[in-house]
Image: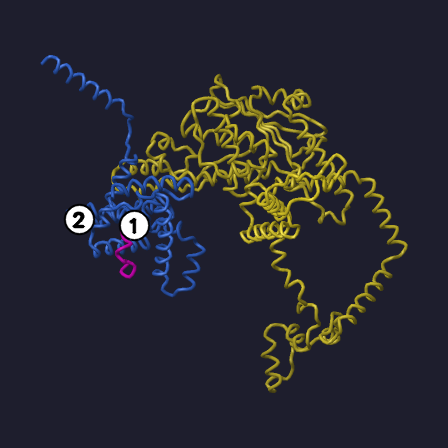
Amino acid sequence: MVLGRGRLRSDYLAQLDPWAGVLIGALAMVGGAATVRLWRLWEPSEHRFGRGGIERGTGRAPWDAPPLVLRWIYVGVFLQLGLFTLDNRALARLIEAPSAFSPGQAEFCREEAEEVEQAAPPGCALVRRAFELGYAATLGQCEPRAAEQVASCSRRQRDEPYLHYAWRLLSKSVATVRGQVNRQAVQRARDQFSRQWEQIADLVAGHREAVTASPRASHHLFTNLPRPRQSLFARVADAIDPGRCVARFAQLPDLPALRDDAQGAASAVEHVVGQLLFSSRFEPVVGLCREYTIHWNAPADACQRLAADPEGFLDETGARPQVQAVLARRARQRAVRGLVGAQNAALAPTEGTESAAADAHVRGVTEVRAVSFQCFTVSDRAEAEAAAVVEFAYAGHRFRAASLSVPEPTPGLRGVIALYRQLASVLAPGFSYTALASRESRAGRQEEAAAFAALDRPGYLLAKAELLRDADIFLGHQWIDERADLQEIYPYHLHLTNFVEVFRQRYQLVRGRL
Amino acid sequence: VNRRVLWLLGTLVLAGATVRAEPAGPTVYERSERQRHLVGALDALNLVDRATLVDVYRYIHVVERNQCQAPLESLKVGCLLEAARRNCRQRARDRRAACHVISDVIITNQLSAENFVPRRVRYHIMRDYSDYQPALRRELRRRHAVLAVEFRLAAGERGNSHRSVVLAAAVDDYCRAFARDHHLSWQHCAAALVWFVATSHRQLEESL
């Protein structure tokens, strides 16, 4: 069911190769039609289910669905089958199949001429020609080396029968196995197996988590804002398909409209968080929306309560199972990595962006980047922003929850921009956006004033609008906030893209996934 | 008579209050002004003679490639505006207004060329053609044409209108929405559409 739902998702279908769609459709139509024809499903049934099982010849005609309906049912069955079995990778392999079956040039030993051509350093053809004509006394560096001359080829000869070649391969394999199977090797394998057997639960759980794509991170944002209103359809769709949020956040407009009420602020917060973390319009995507939870209607002192009683507060907010699952997965990954040992450490699955350097030990307990807590409180009593960081330990790990208390957002562009900056600083501690990070190329206040003055004068409206491309609203520029006419044509996409990308660079350093 | 005087006085007071209640500050870029400017540009490009159009285009092209090269975008824009004003002041009084509007469209198209033709495509064209400027112009025109087709499909009847007022309104609305959804600045979109729609029947390519 999980697989089926995944394959019917709109974003999955959208990325499917058109040829895969054609093949799946053809399979459904041909398979459905063939099944109906071969099983003669248009004929009335001779058997029916009765009290004693399958009965025949009871005198009553059994009820059959109309042939057209049966046909479409089988088309649907084959369509599902096609969707499950044929994806872009399968299609690519099907296309490559003919070349995989034909014997490649690399399977045969090279001809002598080819060998010489291949082994010769670049430019040797001219030297050899000169040697042949007598213009050079020696071949010098182009002289074939002794090792190359005697090197034998163990691959199939061009005139060698296939059975002979197969016999050679078999005898070579037997010789290799004989050489490797000895007492020490058996003992080594036995030790490795017993070590793996001891960790079998972790290994099985790891595979299960990989197959079911269970969350690799658990990030929580607590806010006292109310849950934004959603249509009934959106709520039902979100509940049925949590992965739908990816498509939803990819289609967000540039900036949210900030209405003058708590619902408006909540919608704007959701919009900004979606753009900062999940929107695929910006590179790189740093989070999966199903691994993030915004806890609406949280208490204003959420972070303090979290620090005072982490277990109780996480239970109360329902975040504990998600956090525990990620911490347990992390512990299992560590155990499996230890099992593989130093020899295979490079090949073992790494913890994503959670590098060893960042995995610093703080006061004897580990800080986990894949689990984080943030608090964003909007208060009508606050006059200025107040940031704080609370530290606490939970389940043997150290956490730092960033907390920011802000006044009620001002409706309009200024409020929206402030929201971006505030949420960015809460989500990625240490983030700052200055003129150095901006794409704005202004020289100073005088130039800004000159640009503003030029925009006031009539004429050359198109060319002068270029000046707006050089004014980054994320750096201030109050004059744009005061001009509704300029806001209608302001190229938000330019500076928003830069802001989000700079944020994501910072975010990747401080937060991540397993 | 007294009633009439009172009614007149009341109307005047209301009108004064309305004027005072309007938001302060310039509104050069409000919708009606933008559309008026685009109407002016469409009319000027349709009515101006071919020689003037080619002359203004070439002048701005040369200035942009030579004396207006600047590391700061604002300086470059300022330089181009000043050069265009100077050029238009030399023309006959009755043609100055049209010259300014046409120059505005051409400058904006010059500045947006890099957004329409990405650096990679530009590099390929410069590599493949010894005289690459005509090829670059053709590629730019092709991309403007794609935008114009999308505009015609999206704007429907308004996009096909022969009345410049209707067409300008459609261009403005489309470019505002397009800028939001496709990450193209309003002025780049509007200048490209106005230029393409107004000059597509003139076969200017060979003359530029």
First along the sequence among labels 2 and 1: 2
Q: Main secondary structure of the magenta part?
A: loop
Question: In the figure, is residue A324 to the left or right of B181?
Answer: right
User: What residue do we see at 59% from left, 85% from top?
Assistant: A135
Q: Secondary structure at mark 2?
A: helix
Whether residue B182 is visible, yes or no, is yes
Q: Secondary structure at mark 1?
A: helix
Query: Any mark on residue B72, and which?
Result: none
Q: How far across and how far down the image is residue A359, in percent?
A: 67, 37
Q: How far across and how far down the image is residue A19, in percent?
A: 55, 54
The residue that label 1 is drawn on is: B197
Q: For this rendering, which residue is in front, A331 or A475?
A: A331
* Residue B201 is a magenta residue: yes
The residue that label 2 is drawn on is: B95
Q: How far across and how far down the image is residue A440, in percent?
A: 41, 41
Pinpoint the chain carrying mark 2: B
Residue type at mark 2: give it.
Answer: Arg
Q: Are marks 2 and 1 on the same chain?
A: yes
User: What residue do we see at 63% from left, 56% from top?
Assistant: A93
Q: How many numbered marks appear?
A: 2
* Residue A275 is a magenta residue: no
User: What residue do we see at 30% from left, 49% from top?
Assistant: B107
Q: How far across and how far down the image is residue A428, in percent?
A: 56, 33
Magenta segment boundaries in residue numbering:
B195-208
Badge 1 crowding class, 10 Å Cα cut-off, few under 14, some 14 to 19, many 20 or more, is some
Please name the color used to draw chain B.
Answer: blue
Question: In the figure, is residue A81 to the left or right of A170?
Answer: left
Q: CA separation, marks 2 and 1? A: 21 Å
Pinpoint the chain carrying mark 1: B
